[in-house]
Image (cartoon, rainbow, N blue to C red):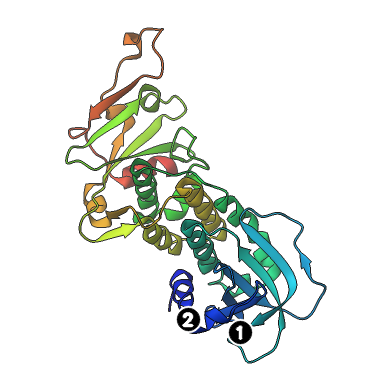
């Protein structure tokens, strides 16, 4: 079965699309064998069409970033034998390929569940999509590595829902994962040496007695996963709707306008090199040695000889 992204791309080259002559006519394909359609209009942007009975046409009063929402809109599907029909429409209004891809990814996941096919449910979810589309920052490779490695931690172990719940709500928070009794900071490296940069306060965090550092090597050679691949695989491991919503929100806020296919890393290398360290075991600087005039102290540490512990040891402190 084609993804909505691949379906949309193939629809752009259909011969019949040249017959489109206004924004209220669409070339459509059905979504997941349902009555919902993915449509392309004159502007060559994607629209989700939900069939409905006739009603008073209206544009939703609530404003959604990058979207237009209409209810009971009279439209014509040019590759359908029927005449004009009524639909609820959710239009993507941004021609940025990354925004279009995000729009389609969002509905790809949302519409897998038939319970989400009703316009009332979809409208409730559009606030999240609007927030996602509002993020415009361009992120460097270092940020992509940070997101990939944090997502890998959630994906790779049997604590996926617990870790999703503990994941930071925004990237400005001091720690990546905060549970009741433990906190986890994730570090990645691409060289052959396990060397990381820390702030003094990061290692001397007074809020958690049990602070752990996860160190993961990321390599972009061999059999690799993109950020989109890893995100979708991680989402499939979650059962709770709350956990799925949290993962989507944090992932897309973190990713911003990043190309989710540009950065790819090997899951096998990450698995073989993932290590957990007690923050207290990582060489640091004695507080008494820091002059009072010095602040925002950062330093680089070779962690190759730091003793590693297992994830079971880490989570045993949370459950005891």
The front one of 78 and 314 is 78
Looking at the rendering, which quadrant does residue 83 occupy? Answer: bottom right
Res 318 → quadrant: top left
Q: Where 28 sits versus 121, above or below? A: below
Tag 2, which secondary structure? Answer: loop
3D distance between C-alphas at marks 2 and 1: 12 Å
Residue pictured at 67% horizontal, 90% vertical? 82
Query: For the point 54% across and 47% down, which residue is it?
Result: 135
Which image quarter holds the N terminus?
A: bottom left
Image quarter where the C terminus lies is top left
> Percent position (x, y) of residue 209?
41, 29
For the residue labelled by badge 1, is the local secondary structure a helix, a strand or a loop? loop
Residue indicated by mark 1: 78
Residue 239 appears in view = no
x%, y% of residue 112?
Answer: 53, 72
Whole-percent x, y for residue 295 in the image: 41, 15
State the residue lying farthest toward the right: 56
Nearer to us in this view, 255 or 195: 255
Pointer 2 or 1: first along the chain? 2
Residue in the picture at 46% in, 69% down: 5
- Is residue 24 shown left or right of residue 114? right
Q: Within 10 angstroms of label 1, few (less than 14), some, or many (20 or more) residues? A: some
Q: Which mark is residue 14?
A: 2
Can you see residue 231? yes
Location of residue 53 in the rendering, given as x and y in whole percent from the top left corner: 76, 81
């Amino acid at each position: 079965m084609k993804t909505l992204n691949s379906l949309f791309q193939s629809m752009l080259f259909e011969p019949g699309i040249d017959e489109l002559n206004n924004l209220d006519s669409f070339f459509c394909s059905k979504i997941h064998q349902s009555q919902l359609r993915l449509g392309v209009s004159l502007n060559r942007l994607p629209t989700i069409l939900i069939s409905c009975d006739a009603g008073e046409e209206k544009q939703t009063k609530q404003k959604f970033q990058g979207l237009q929402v209409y209810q009971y809109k009279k439209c014509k599907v040019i590759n359908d034998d029927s005449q004009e029909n009524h639909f609820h429409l959710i239009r993507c209004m941004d021609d940025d390929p990354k925004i279009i891809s995000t729009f389609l990814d969002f509905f790809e996941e949302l519409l897998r569940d038939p319970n989400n096919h009703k316009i009332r449910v979809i409208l409730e979810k559009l606030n999240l999509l609007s927030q996602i589309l509002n993020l415009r920052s361009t992120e460097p490779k270092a940020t992509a590595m940070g997101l990939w490695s944090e997502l890998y931690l959630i994906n790779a172990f049997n604590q996926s829902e617990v870790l999703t719940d503990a994941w930071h709500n925004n990237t400005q928070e001091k720690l990546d994962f905060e549970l009741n009794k433990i906190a986890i900071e994730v570090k990645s490296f691409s060289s052959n040496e396990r060397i990381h940069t820390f702030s003094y306060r990061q290692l001397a965090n007074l809020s958690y007695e049990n602070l752990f550092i996860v160190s993961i090597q990321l390599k972009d050679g061999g059999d690799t996963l993109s950020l989109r691949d890893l995100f979708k695989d991680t989402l499939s491991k979650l059962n709770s709707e709350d956990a799925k919503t949290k993962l989507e929100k944090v992932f897309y806020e973190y990713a911003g306008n990043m190309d989710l296919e540009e950065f790819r890393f090997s899951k096998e290398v990450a698995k073989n090199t993932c290590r957990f360290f007690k923050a207290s075991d990582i060489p640091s600087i004695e507080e008494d040695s820091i002059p009072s005039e010095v602040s925002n102290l950062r330093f680089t540490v070779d962690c190759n000889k730091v003793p590693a512990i297992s994830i079971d040891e880490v989570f045993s402190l949370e459950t005891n």
